[in-house]
Amino acid sequence: MSRETREISVDYLARVEGEGALFLSLDGDVVKDLQFKIFEPPRFYEAFLRGRRHSEAPDITARICGICPVAYQTSSINAMEYAAGVTVDPRIRDLRRLLYFGEWIESHTLHVYMLHAPDFLGYPSAIEMAADMPEVVTNALRLKRLGNQIMTIVGGREIHPINVKVGGFYRAPTAAELEPLAGELRWAIETAADTVSLVAGFEFPNFSMDYEFVALRHPDEYAIVDGRIISSRGLDIDVSEWSEHFEESHVERSNALHVRLKERGRFHVGPMARYALNADLLTPRARDAADSVGLHPGESNPFRSIIVRAVEIVLACEEALEIIEHYQAPDPASVSVEPRSATGFGASEAPRGLLYHRYDIDDDGMIADAQIVPPTAQNQAQIEEDLRKFAPWHSHLEDDVLQWHLEQAIRNYDPCISCATHFLDLTVERTGAR
Amino acid sequence: MKRLIGIGNPDRGDDGVGWEVASRVRSWHTMTVTAGSFDLIDDWDADDEVVIVDAMRSGRATGATLRIDARANEVPTSAFASTHTFGPAEVVALAKAMGRLPRTLEVIGIEAGTVVHGSTMSSEVAAAATELVKELEHA
């Protein structure tokens, strides 16, 4: 086969949230250069949090993302309550978990069915898939709507909830308001379990990576609203120790800061990391669904992340049902949080992975400094490494097919570029033999 | 039922025209959303008459109104580009693919001028909104 120069450029990546691009330069099957670019403009959230009251952080940071606002609210609230030395009533914490599971259901359903499944089934988008599989898409819409309903009842509205505050909620929903969700959640558990079987039947590239997984760990639950930060290579730290072990840096190709473990470099956050580190804490139906398709905690094929997301939908529905069945409205719905001069640290598990916040609060309860580290920013280096390893496997393919596989590899991470910039566009440049 | 869905961002000048029309029409059941979403197809029933109003960028003069019978015609994706993943064109295409179209479905685009955050609506788009409200009230 003749040698040739190949340069593939994807100027605007599809089916990801936000604006990003990919540039790939190939010399035969050797990757000369690969850049996962985030060109969505920086949004300067940390800067305009300075000088705002500590109580404003949940509402301001929620605006970073329309898909995962609860994640931002929860991590910021954790940080503010940490700074003030406040612990909330377990019933308030359960209500936070319920709201967060609503977000997981909505976000994971959107990605599994609408954004990622078409890749495996050979459809250009969910619209073409819907024509052939209307019942699957109908179920997806119903699941997504359930997530939205939970968000609306607990959070006040389905996007950017307004019922959330430092210390708890402005108003706790009544048991009667939550009860109608129970029947739909029972349907959703079975539908999501069927989805696990459906997506596990997809054809996956035989590809795996040696990841360091990083996620929250809670002793009694599959962690979502809080926990210690642990990794598959022995990291086990309090959230307040984050900056001792992780560092952010700017790279020219990205308006989102890259994040590295100081000792070992890149790492992987998200559903696969959570599953690797918390599989022993799955809920019963989620455990059964995972076992039935042979999904092991050591799963390291990023394309199979779609199965993990489906398992997490089962878990989210089971956990939400459990909370609703035992619900007692917290009274009062919030505790008083008196700010003090301190630094607050907070983390939670956004649908896409660990979301870390840090705030310096002054004597007047004002935010003096803020740091927000979203999951997609943390995954950037790992996404590039996946692509660097994956591209040579498919270097024999025509540019358009290669591009499609590379975009699929990026969607494994369900990247939220808008969050990361608080970003996609592929360029492939080829030289040498194919 | 006659349902009017206004799409857009009321804090971005002319992009708020869908919301503006929805807020002033009295004889339709109205709702507003910030972006097109697949979920919208659950918001109408098979017997409904549905109108979707959104700002567009089609190259026409600011304030120009384009009415598309979405049951009979394709809605141009390019004119209704969204900063999010889905716009009205995708919602209509999904509804067609799934056999979930309402009895009538019209997509009305009003050509936007400025969509800068914090800007006010242009006089051309405001006038087009007023005219459209009158037409819809008498439809």
Image (cartoon, rainbow, N blue to C red):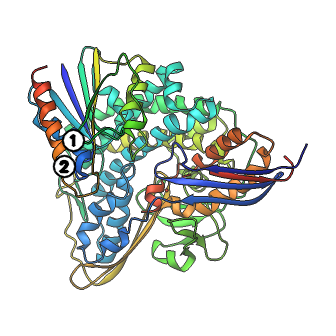
Cβ–Cβ under 8 Å for marks 1 and 2:
yes
Q: Amino acid at mark 2?
A: Met
Q: Quadrant of residue B91?
A: top left
Q: Residue at x 62, y 63 (%)?
A: A381
Q: Residue at x 21, y 76 (%)?
A: A338
Residue B121 circle label: 2
Q: Amino acid at mark 1?
A: Val
| B77, above or below A166, in the image | above
| Marked residue chain, label 1 | B
Q: Residue at x 47, y 20 (%)?
A: A135
Q: Secondary structure at mark 2?
A: loop
Give the camera-side residue of A264 and A430.
A430
Residue A235 circle label: none
The x, y position of residue A55, in whole percent, is 23, 69
The x, y position of residue A315, in whole percent, is 47, 42
Q: Secondary structure at mark 1?
A: helix
Would residue A214 be seen by someone viewing this image from the given angle? no
Q: Is residue A396 left or right of residue B90?
A: right
Query: To which residue does mark 1 refer?
Result: B17
The x, y position of residue A16, in whole percent, is 50, 47
The x, y position of residue A368, in whole percent, is 31, 81
| Marked residue chain, label 2 | B
Q: Upstream in the sequence, badge 1 or badge 2?
A: 1
| A319, above or below A257, in the image | above
| B60, above or below A183, in the image | below
Q: Are marks 1 and 2 on the same chain?
A: yes
Number of callouts? 2
Give the camera-side residue of A112 and B113.
B113
Quadrant the N terminus of chain A occupies = top right
Question: Which residue sits furthest front?
Answer: B61
